[in-house]
Amino acid sequence: MSENGITTAGGAHDGSGEALRPHAEVAFAHELAALAAADDRPRPERWRLSPWAVATYLLGGTLADGTVITPKYVGPRRIVEVAVTTLATDRALLLLGVPGTAKTWVSEHLAAAVSGDSTLLVQGTAGTPEEAIRYGWNYARLLAQGPSADALVPGPVMRAMAQGMTARVEELTRIPADVQDTLITLLSEKTLPIPELGQEVQAVHGFNLIATANDRDRGVNDLSSALRRRFNTVVLPLPATPEDEVDIVARRVAQIGSSLRLPPAPQGMDEIRRVVTVFRELRDGVTTDGRTKLKSPSGTLSTAEAISVVTSGLALATHFGDGVLRPGDVAAGILGAVVRDPTADRVVWQEYLETVVRERDGWKDFYRACREVGA
Amino acid sequence: MTGVNGTGPVLLGVRHHGPGSARAVRAALEQCAPRAVLIEGPPEADALVPLAAHPEMRPPVALLAHAVDDPGRAAFWPLAAFSPEWVALRWALEHDVPVRFIDLPAAHALAMADEEPETGERPEEGGTAPGTGTGEAAGEQGASASAAAVRLDPLRVLAETAGHDDPERWWEDVVEHRGPGRAARSWGSPRASGVESRGGVESGGGAEGGGGPEADALAPFAVLAEAMAALRAALDDGSDRDAVREAHMRLRLRAARREFGDPVAVVCGAWHVPALARAAARPGSGGSPAPPTVAADRQLLKGLPKVKTALTWVPWTHRRLARRSGYGAGITSPGWYGHLFEAPDRPVERWLTKAAWLLREEDHAVSSAHVIEAVRLAEGLAAIRGRPLAGLAELDDAVRAVMTAGSDVPAALIRDRLVVGEVLGQVPEDAPAVPLQRDLARCQRTLRLRPEAAERELELDLRKETDAGRSGLLHRLQLLGIPWGEPARSRGGTGTFRETWRLRWEPELSVRVAEAGVWGTTVLTAATAKATSDAAEATVLAEVTALAERCLLAGLPEALPVVMRALADRAALDADVGHLAQALPALVRAVRYGDVRGTDAGALRAVALGLAGRIFVGLPPACAGLDAEGAAELRGHLDATHRAVGLLGQVAEETGAPDRATVEPPAPPLRERWAAVLRTLAERDTVPGLLRGRAARLLLDDGRLPGDGAERLMALALSPGTPPADAAGWIEGFVGGPGGGLLLVHDERLLALVDGWLTRVPDAVFVDVLPLLRRTFGGYDTGVRRTLGELVRRGPSGGSRHPAPGPADAAAPGFGPGLDRDRAAAVLPTLRLLLGIPQRGYEDEDGRDENGRGRDGSERGGTSEGADGVGNGSGTTGTEGAAPATNEPTGAGR
């Protein structure tokens, strides 16, 4: 099927030294090669690496020949082990998590390590049609020759089935329910019928599917239990420690800031720490010292939102202040992130202000700033 | 090696509570059929052994040793169905083989625990913990924790030697998961054998694996003993406690050999095996160092401290076996161990099926297909992690990924119900009395409070020490569910230092005492444990508040922090202001009780303040958009909160400013904040009239509506645009309840406003408003109603009063202008006497005070002209009848 031009998407990365963001299998080609060379464990059919090596690729480590494998995912080891084992037992894998928990990142690297190709991708949107998952037609040929294998344009999943590769579906819950249903037979029967040709594509060993979904946007297009049953679910957690999260936020803010031509703000570290603390406490429903429980607001308060609060605060400080990130710059952003539901969340936020922030040493100015904004 | 095939005593080193060890012990006993079984445990328990065969005996149970004089000093030896010791005990009983316990007598162990807070068992095989029990009972958790941390963990060393980071998992892999019963299957799969060559102790794996099902049941023990011997040789073991215990074990072992000959079996922690092996060895066997002599052992045991102890069996639960609760036995997953022990085969499949059944009962959709996939995933995970069999970690991951779709809630359910489990042990009734019973009897003696079947009343004056002790005991027993005394209403009213109890000792209360024995060995510790557990289980905020109150009453300072913690947590998560408002009064009461009884209620006060803060935040939104019923309910909460805040503010004041001579103490921020909330309520349009009126009234009563604030609010509420029903609600809130009538009587401006509004109410609506008004005014005292009617009938003096409000010429209705000072002076001496004002000096102020005069005047009006007043109709009819009459003058006056 490759001669009808479909593989150009996959083949494009040959000359991708210039790409803004190279695919995982290109960027880490040397690590994958070193792992493949060192890996003497049994590999499932058509896998580039053994499950053990795939886990090492994601979690990092040092090989016997001295090659250092950088960690791709920083988080609990068991999560990666469950994910890899799931793929090895030819069950589909569903990565769940709030936005900004590296779902896509993990799925890309898993596909790169298992199949050496992370480009068999279906991007889920509200308008994703069935053709994007199964197959479409080259209409010129279809009109000229009638239905034939040549006129068929296979989708990424169909190609993965035929070649025994790993397909990826991003944002599964954004795809309309009827299109999601296409996946059910595909995953349980491992076959894709083409009634127009009276043929079918049967999945060969090595085929599997990784889907990602956001578990906070409920009610978008919730998975039917029939489909859910076809997946093993792995929930990717938020950063485990405050230090991790402060680090992630600070790093991302620096990256975004530089592209927005904002000056770096090393003095703002305290504010960043504060934003992260507020977000973590409200998200976890308990204060950092573990002594006071809190109500959680309806918003997700993910790391990504903390990043955006700090970035906009930085912009405020740069353009309207003295360039130093101060409580007043982040207060409005925090309020906006926390109070999504005007009544319930406002109570949550005020309770938090009055019971926690008010009493905390060194938070007086922040408390005042929040009171001003919230009044 | 000693102990094989009857050439000497058989030493079965086990891991306490290890199901694998238990299976192995049974197999070994079956194989060598000893003539006596020696078990690590207190020798005093020998007499209790036959009870283990009692049909009503059901594990988990625990051997409980306690000092006779001081039941608080106690130690537990918990035994579950899967404990090797229990298995050995039951085997011996089934085969009529004598059982001897060989550990150091509890008499010494308890006495020694007092001297050194050493809690030594943990470093052994992570197993039973008589020591831990003692440490906990003595309240020395801190000391025991640090001591245990310092001491060496031999299992960890073994596991690390084998390249495992987690000793528990290592032990599971090499022993627990490889019981002889399952060996064939495990080795049968190529994956497992591959693993075997990689991990663990090669000799151990080899010895077990090579043999298959018909392997020598003693082989694993021999290998384990060797490993332990190497370990003990390598590590300098300096524990005196172990040396003493092992000396005693050796002496008992020698005595048993004299009595029964060589074929005896010893079941003890693997750590002790080398020490016993040296004593058990034949002199000529060589290799091992010279065994300690009998004399040396006796020397070690000389002069040990001793206390009089009593032993009994007590029921135990899986939950208490788990490490995190009280007398933990050091195992986190008793349910899983029980499963491993009981499951005849396929532990993984059976476990996941169990999990599926549990989830189905809880209405999660889990099909057989889920179980199949979970099994596949668990086995795959075990392979990728290099384990011979899927363990708990793999099963947990599999359940999460496949069955619960990543959700933590069902996973927590499985942990609670399956991994820990809800198994409850049972002990036959003829087991010796529990220490709690003795402690209760002791308390009854010291407090001279005899249990009597006849009912009698007991008056307690809490200022007396004995009475306070009695009250504490009765409250503690109540907490424990032993209702010996029922609190009755005090005759002396609601004084906080007086209590009345109705006492009656029913025979079944003894049973209750025995049941309560699981909570602790003394009334105090048991009540504390029970309160702590109750706090954790309570679902509704009010329950926890009540519990806090009871903790204070019962004098349980140690339970209080836990209860407070639970209280703060529940309060933080409870979104219903009504619940919070319900909880606050009891809490404030508790704060005051605490003060009366001299308990430190600082923590309580902090929680109460936090709760009040949450109410302040939540109340305004909660008051918006309510129907009549909801408003009435919230009005009750409003009143209760107001009272509570007043008390709480007082408490804060008393601690802050003991000098109460000042007329108006600086208002504490708490009350200020509450006043701000009330002000918000009083002014917010979306709040129902009833609540707005109530808030205004509360503000007025507190003197926080300066000048004509009340009048302004009332005018606003009763202005023509307001729906009459809402306005009537406002009136009910403002002047309803006690004191409301007098307010109207005293402040004619308010009365005139009500009056004016009432005349404006259209006829059609009047009928709707009438019940509300009737409810409001019907609640007043007859005298007040009569006076009101009187005032209304006479018509307001507002016309003359408002334009010129100077006090000198303003006149109460029915009186001339000015004040007749001579007549007023005649009342003053009596008034002084009543009010207890000693010296003169208030006269002039009194004379000018408008309110004072108003009261004076109205009272006189009421009494002198009451007979021909409005009549005996209700206040409403009076008002109604009077309304048209007043209409004209009001209009004319303005």
Image (spheres, coloured by chain):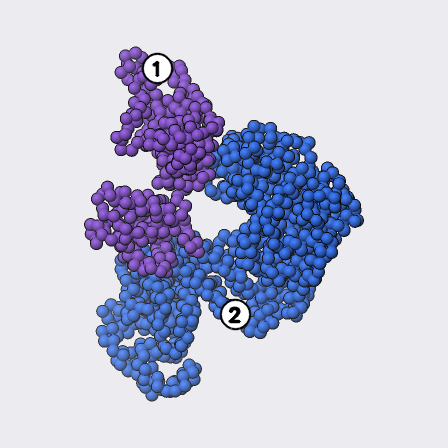
Chain colours: A purple, B blue
Q: Disc 2 marks which amino acid?
A: Arg
Looking at the image, can residue B665 be seen? yes
Q: Is residue B305 left or right of residue B763?
A: right
- Residue at the image point whose x is 27% and y is 54% from the top: A326
- Residue at the image point whose x is 48% and y is 54% from the top: B540
Looking at the image, can residue B454 be seen? no
- Residue at the image point whose x is 55% and y is 38% from the top: B391
Residue A313 location (% of width, % of height): 26, 49
Whether A318 is drawn above or below B796: the answer is above
Instruction: Classify residue B205 by image quadrant.
Output: top right
Q: Where's the C terminus of chain A, which quadrant?
A: bottom left
Q: Disc 1 marks which amino acid?
A: Ala
- The chain ID associated with circle 2 is B
Q: The residue tagged with tag 1: helix, strand or loop? A: helix
Q: Is residue B542 left or right of residue B514?
A: left
- The chain ID associated with circle 1 is A
Q: Nearer the viewer, residue B371 or B793?
A: B371
Q: Where's the N terminus of chain A, which quadrant?
A: top left
Residue A215 location (% of width, % of height): 39, 39
Please identify the residue farthest to the top as the structure is shown: A145
Q: The residue tagged with tag 2: helix, strand or loop? A: helix
Residue B844 location (% of width, % of height): 32, 84
Question: What residue is pinned by disc 1?
Answer: A149
Residue B393 location (% of width, % of height): 52, 40
Q: Is residue B443 left or right of residue A177?
A: right
Disc 2 versus disc 1: distance between alpha carbons?
91 Å
Question: What residue is pinned by disc 2?
Answer: B597
Whether A170 is drawn above or below B852: the answer is above
